[in-house]
Image: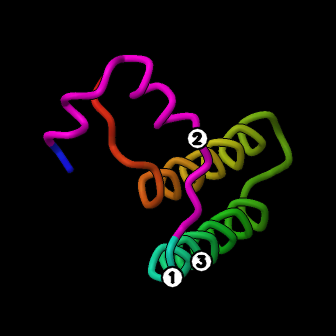
Amino acid sequence: MESSMQDMSMEQKVEQIVTYHAPDEDGIKRISNIRESTKFLILTILRNCPPCADRSAAIRKVREGMMTANASIVVPQVQL
Protein backbone atom coordinates (compact mmCIF):
# COMPACT_ATOMS: atom_id res chain seq x y z
CA MET A 1 0.00 0.00 0.00
CA GLU A 2 2.98 2.29 0.66
CA SER A 3 4.02 2.41 -2.99
CA SER A 4 0.45 3.06 -4.16
CA MET A 5 0.33 6.13 -1.87
CA GLN A 6 3.55 7.40 -3.48
CA ASP A 7 1.99 7.03 -6.93
CA MET A 8 -1.04 9.17 -6.01
CA SER A 9 -1.44 12.70 -7.34
CA MET A 10 -1.55 15.60 -4.88
CA GLU A 11 -5.33 15.85 -5.44
CA GLN A 12 -5.80 12.15 -4.69
CA LYS A 13 -3.75 12.49 -1.51
CA VAL A 14 -5.85 15.44 -0.33
CA GLU A 15 -9.02 13.50 -1.11
CA GLN A 16 -7.68 10.60 0.96
CA ILE A 17 -7.06 12.94 3.91
CA VAL A 18 -10.48 14.64 3.91
CA THR A 19 -12.64 11.58 3.18
CA TYR A 20 -14.50 9.94 6.06
CA HIS A 21 -12.86 6.66 7.06
CA ALA A 22 -14.97 4.37 9.25
CA PRO A 23 -12.98 2.40 11.82
CA ASP A 24 -12.91 -1.38 11.67
CA GLU A 25 -13.66 -3.49 14.78
CA ASP A 26 -10.13 -3.17 16.12
CA GLY A 27 -10.14 0.57 15.43
CA ILE A 28 -13.40 0.98 17.35
CA LYS A 29 -11.82 -0.69 20.39
CA ARG A 30 -8.70 1.46 20.21
CA ILE A 31 -10.73 4.66 19.75
CA SER A 32 -12.83 3.69 22.77
CA ASN A 33 -9.66 3.21 24.85
CA ILE A 34 -8.42 6.64 23.82
CA ARG A 35 -11.82 8.21 24.59
CA GLU A 36 -11.89 6.70 28.10
CA SER A 37 -8.37 7.94 28.83
CA THR A 38 -9.29 11.37 27.50
CA LYS A 39 -12.35 11.56 29.74
CA PHE A 40 -10.20 10.65 32.75
CA LEU A 41 -7.65 13.35 31.92
CA ILE A 42 -10.30 16.03 31.34
CA LEU A 43 -11.99 15.17 34.64
CA THR A 44 -8.60 15.32 36.37
CA ILE A 45 -7.99 18.79 34.92
CA LEU A 46 -11.47 19.97 35.96
CA ARG A 47 -11.02 18.68 39.51
CA ASN A 48 -7.54 20.13 40.00
CA CYS A 49 -7.28 23.33 37.99
CA PRO A 50 -9.10 26.54 38.82
CA PRO A 51 -11.57 27.87 36.24
CA CYS A 52 -9.53 30.06 33.92
CA ALA A 53 -8.45 30.47 30.32
CA ASP A 54 -5.54 28.05 30.80
CA ARG A 55 -7.85 25.30 32.08
CA SER A 56 -10.11 25.80 29.06
CA ALA A 57 -7.10 25.70 26.74
CA ALA A 58 -5.80 22.53 28.40
CA ILE A 59 -9.14 20.78 27.89
CA ARG A 60 -9.29 21.96 24.27
CA LYS A 61 -5.78 20.63 23.60
CA VAL A 62 -6.55 17.27 25.23
CA ARG A 63 -9.64 17.00 23.01
CA GLU A 64 -7.54 17.93 19.98
CA GLY A 65 -5.02 15.25 20.93
CA MET A 66 -7.81 12.68 21.19
CA MET A 67 -9.11 13.58 17.74
CA THR A 68 -5.63 13.45 16.21
CA ALA A 69 -4.94 10.07 17.84
CA ASN A 70 -8.26 8.76 16.50
CA ALA A 71 -7.40 10.01 13.04
CA SER A 72 -4.11 8.12 13.19
CA ILE A 73 -6.12 4.94 13.64
CA VAL A 74 -8.50 5.33 10.69
CA VAL A 75 -6.99 7.73 8.14
CA PRO A 76 -4.45 6.22 5.75
CA GLN A 77 -1.16 8.02 6.31
CA VAL A 78 -0.41 10.20 3.30
CA GLN A 79 2.79 12.16 2.74
CA LEU A 80 2.11 15.47 1.01
Q: Earlier in the sequence, mark 1 or mark 2?
A: 2
SS state under label 1: helix
Could you classify mark 3 by the number of other residues whose Cα lies within 10 Å: few (under 14), some (14-19), or many (20 or more)?
A: few
- Residue receiving disc 1: 25
Residue closest to the eye, 65 or 15: 15
Q: Residue visible at 21% across and 40% down?
A: 4
Q: Earlier in the sequence, mark 3 or mark 2?
A: 2
Q: Residue visible at 20% across and 28% down?
A: 7
Whole-percent x, y for residue 70 in the image:
52, 58
Which quarter shows the C terminus? top left
Q: Is residue 73 left or right of residue 32?
A: left
- Residue receiving disc 2: 19
Most distant residue in the top direction:
10
Residue closest to the eye, 51 or 11: 11
Magenta part mainly helix, strand or loop?
Answer: helix
Label 3 and label 2: CA atoms lie apart by 21 Å
The amino acid marked with disc number 3 is Ser
Q: Is residue 6 left or right of residue 65?
A: left
Please name which of the two marks, 3 or 2, marks the residue nearer to the observer: 2
The amino acid marked with disc number 1 is Glu
- Residue receiving disc 3: 32
Q: Residue visible at 50% across and 74% down?
A: 24
SS state under label 3: helix
Please name which of the two marks, 3 or 1, marks the residue nearer to the observer: 1
Q: Earlier in the sequence, mark 3 or mark 1?
A: 1
In this figure, what is the number of numbered marks? 3
Q: Residue visible at 36% across and 17% down?
A: 10
Q: Which mark is residue 47?
A: none
Residue 70 lies in the magenta stretch: no
Label 3 and label 1: CA atoms lie apart by 11 Å
Most distant residue in the right direction:
51
